[in-house]
Image: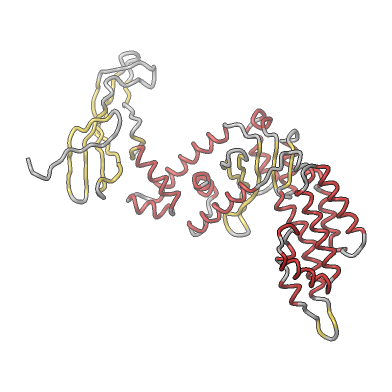
Amino acid sequence: MASDVMSVRLWLSQTKVSGVLVDEPGELVVGVRSTVTRPVCPHCGAKSGRVHDRRAKRVRDLEVSGRPTTLVWDRRRMACDGCGRRFLEDHRAFEGRFTARLARRVVADAGDMSVRAAARRHRVGWHVVMGLVIACAGLAGEHRRRQRCRVLLVDETSIRKRHRYVTVLVNGDTGKVLAMVPHRSEAALSGFLAAQGHRWCKAVKIVVSDGSAAYAAAIAKRLGHARHVLDRFHVIRWFAAGLTAVRRDVQRRPEGPKPAFDPAAFRARFLLMRRPDTLDGAERKRLEDLFAAHPRLKAAWDALSELHGLYLAKDRKGALEALDRFADIYGAGQIPEFSSVVDTFLAWHDQILGWHQAGRPSNGRIEGTNNLLQALRRQAHGLTNHANFEARGILVT
């Protein structure tokens, strides 16, 4: 025996190595066979030990020392003693053209890199890798949708920038993506909820979404028993639009033959969005100097601070008190730009004020998921197929 010869151990359960067929620097081929003596007949469930014939099947496996490894499975064709029908034996370590562990590695690599890069790494075609990803994502998504969902998070993201949107649904308790439905319409969300069934929908107690009228209609239709809450981030962004309108007005007020521009008001645009309890001494002094020159800006900032109080309050009663203080400031008539804020609040007041009673939920998990999905889109240099985007998105998140 040569001094550089060694035995091969594959670490595959219920598998025995019958011999090394090819052992070269660029390739390793190993013959294997199953150690199960009596396979189960898929037709009648009886065990059979009578072999009708044998067929060699080539199966790709993980690389060994950087060499592509192929297993030649001596697959038996059995003749069932119970029903008399013939069948090919199955093995849990082999899945089609790959071993189960190689398929898992390919799917994991597709989550960390582009599908094309994963295909090059494992020396297979792009469609082979994508097929494994879709199959694995389908199993994962089906498993997640069978679980009970108490808090449902709903938001949209785009496959391509500013068009081809999808509706993303996340289990708020686990943070797992349940599905990514094409479009962002009422029909898209309503169709998903209808497919889940009445029993699953009945378990949903809280739904958190942005201010989409289409989503609100679907939620009212399919989840009328649940408490619908608007995400705090989107609501505060609506409120801040009033202060932004006032700031733009005071900094661009024309004085003389040319429009004047107040650089101090413009530079403070981010500072104005801060809550009073987050400011230090220097920042407060800067705002006081700005408010001395622009009293309307002071009123707008106070109004936004009271609207922040809707979420800083400990309960619904405290939120209503903050709303009363905002109404007093708005009633003074110095900030008519907040009229659109008032109209928006009146249209969504049930979903906004119900935040405390629902346990202060947030869409933070789904916003983080959307960040991962956008990173995935950039990694793939753009995606056009919804099914592929959903499959990769479920695995990445």
Q: Is residue 88 above or below residue 344?
A: above
Name which quarter of the figure residue 294 lies in: bottom right
Judged from this view, the residue extending furthest toward the top is 82
Residue 347 position within the rendered picture, expressed as x and y whole percent measured from the top left: 82, 49
Residue at x 63%, y 59% (from the top left corner):
162
In the displayed structure image, the side of residue 256 where residue 270 appears, left or right: left
Q: Nearer the viewer, residue 351 or 188?
A: 351
Q: Nearer the viewer, residue 160 or 80?
A: 160
Q: Is residue 52 above or below residue 314?
A: above
Residue 157 position within the rendered picture, expressed as x and y whole percent measured from the top left: 61, 52
Residue at x 79%, y 74% (from the top left corner):
251
In the displayed structure image, the side of residue 117 where residue 324 appears, left or right: right
Task: Give the quarter of the figure containing the N terminus.
Answer: top left
Q: Is residue 376 above or below residue 262?
A: above
Residue at x 21%, y 44% (from the top left corner):
28
In the displayed structure image, the side of residue 86 where residue 183 appears, left or right: right
Judged from this view, the residue extending furthest toward the right is 332
Residue 87 position within the rendered picture, expressed as x and y whole percent measured from the top left: 32, 24
Residue at x 86%, y 59% (from the top left corner):
339
Q: Nearer the viewer, residue 316 or 95?
A: 316
What is the basis of the colouring in this image? secondary structure
Judged from this view, the residue extending furthest toward the left is 1
Residue 122 position within the rendered picture, expressed as x and y whole percent measured from the top left: 33, 49
